[in-house]
Image: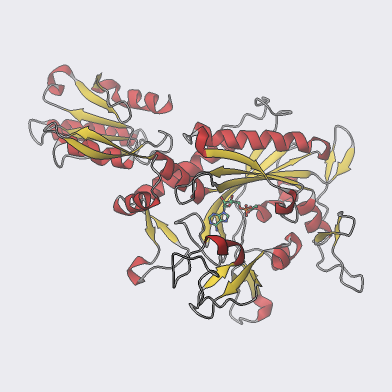
Amino acid sequence: MIRSMDKVVALCKRRGFIFQNSEIYGGQNGFWDYGPLGTELKRNVRDAWYHDMVQAHNELLTPAGAPSPFQMVGLESAIIMHPQVWKCSGHYDLFHDMMVDCHECKGRFRQDHLPSTPCPLKPSRTVGQHTSCRLTEPREFNLMFKTILGALGTEDDAAFLRPETAQGIFVNFRNVVDSTRVRLPFGICQVGKSFRNEITPRNFTFRSREFEQMEIEFFCRPDQSRDWYTYWRDRRYNWYLGLGISLDRLILRDHHADELAHYSVGTADIEYAFPFLDAGQYGELEGIAHRGDFDLRSHMEGKLAKNAAGELEVEKLPDGRPKYRGSGKDLSYFDDQTRERFVPHVIEPSAGADRGTLAFLCEAYHEDQQPDDKGELQERVLMKFHPRLAPVKAAVFPLIKKEGMPEQAMAIYGEMRAAGLSCQFDQQAAIGKRYRRQDEIGTPFCITVDGDTAQDKCVTLRDRDTLQQERIPVARIVDEVTMRLKS
Ligand code: GAP
């Protein structure tokens, strides 16, 4: 992996991974579009997450490190929810950043980002350090996007685009328990878009205004919540390592008490050494929060806040009425083994699909030198994606465009696609150039039909990372590639 974000961004545009949104109109700050390869890559990230967390989960076995077996189910809730959801969750009152404006350059900045934000008028200085900077007092800015429902368009019809997928899970807790056979402990998982009106979107897709989250709300008995918190911290950290992120660029960092969100009694972040950060700095990929019973109790009773003794209680107006009423619905759980009723505790591993995808792109980027068809060394860009994440799994080439080779290659290409393997067919340019095109998008295997194929019924299978080439029978090629992708 190299430490140049510019090269990763240039490759993303050149090869169709990620484009600036609305680029032909000058771009829309904080929004990004995924091109054909980026769409496949991000879909593979999402699919790997859903497969590993939900589909392939066996609720009859105890996974290594887990206190007991558990169930995992999926959910897909709407982006717009009842406004009361955001009042009881705390987002309406508390989900804000402090911002400052500069009268001189007319820029708007997040106060906590000032020490690392270059002044637009004098980029060698940070905002506030240049003698002409004239900053306003910091003020609160709520990050939720507001919209209006229906035709009347009054303030009473205001709603919000969700800033996290998590609340869709909490408000459906009762529905899931009542409509399925899940028993504690269990997790409800959701992948979907979230929206935050970030004051200063930056660092490519890292901080965007529209992004995708992959969230698990794991419900458990309060007396077991610490053990589950430890389990999920470790499990989620290892998930990134298993998909190729290197141990020396990934950390698991516990939050200090003053960093904890209003609901959290413990949080750890999984962080990655992104190339846009200084050496020794890490950016958050995922947070694993011990949320206690905050969310379910808030949606049941009304918005919770900490009292003078540091305990959570329903927030009250000066006249003693609750500030925001909860749903009044019973979101407690009855344990039919122990005959106890309680409000479950929640462990929340909350990952960003775009940040994960960006980390996998940065991690994959390699450069080396390889001889071309004339034996001269050429710069090569190589995306070393984990085979599960690679947007294209194999490419099929006829060595030359005659002697029946294109037809044989097309037949193999058809079989690969019919087997569900994302595959490309390429007969343009010299073979070395075609290999380099595939290396640059991270295709793990290239298959070449040559002059011997008609006789020996074999093709050459080339491995992206080892560059080894082997003869494999045509009849076995689909199975062979499928098997190697899994190993
Ligand atoms: N439900 C908890 C929650 O939303 P968060 O730490 O605010 O927690 C979880 O967000 C993850 O969502 C982050 O770790 C990050 O990967 C992703 N995320 C948050 N804000 C983002 C943004 N503006 N752009 C891209 N990804 C973002």
**Number of residue marks:** 0
Image quarter of residue 422: top left
Q: Where is residue 362 drawn, in percent x and y?
A: 42, 44
> In the rendered view, how is the structure colored?
secondary structure
**Left-right relation of 303 to 436:** right
Residue that sits furthest to the right in the current view: 320
**Which residue is more in the foreground, 392 or 173?**
392
Q: Where is residue 179 drawn, in percent x and y?
A: 71, 45
**Left-right relation of 217 to 462:** right
Using the rendered image of the protein, determine whether residue 216 is visible from the camera's viewpoint.
no
Residue that sits furthest to the top in the current view: 456
Residue that sits furthest to the front in the current view: 131
**Left-right relation of 430 to 253:** left
Q: Quadrant of the N terminus?
A: top left
100 up-or-down from 173: above or below: below
Image quarter of residue 326: bottom right
10 up-or-down from 280: above or below: below
**Left-right relation of 417 to 356:** left
**Which residue is more in the foreground, 413 or 316?**
316
Q: Where is residue 292 drawn, in percent x and y?
A: 78, 47
- Give the residue displayed 65% in from the left and 37% down from the top: 233
- Give the residue displayed 53% in from the left and 75% down from the top: 133
- Give the residue displayed 51% in from the left and 60% down from the top: 208
434 up-or-down from 140: above or below: above
Q: Quadrant of the C terminus?
A: top left
Using the rendered image of the protein, determine whether residue 48 is visible from the camera's viewpoint.
yes
Q: Where is residue 93 drawn, in percent x and y?
A: 73, 67
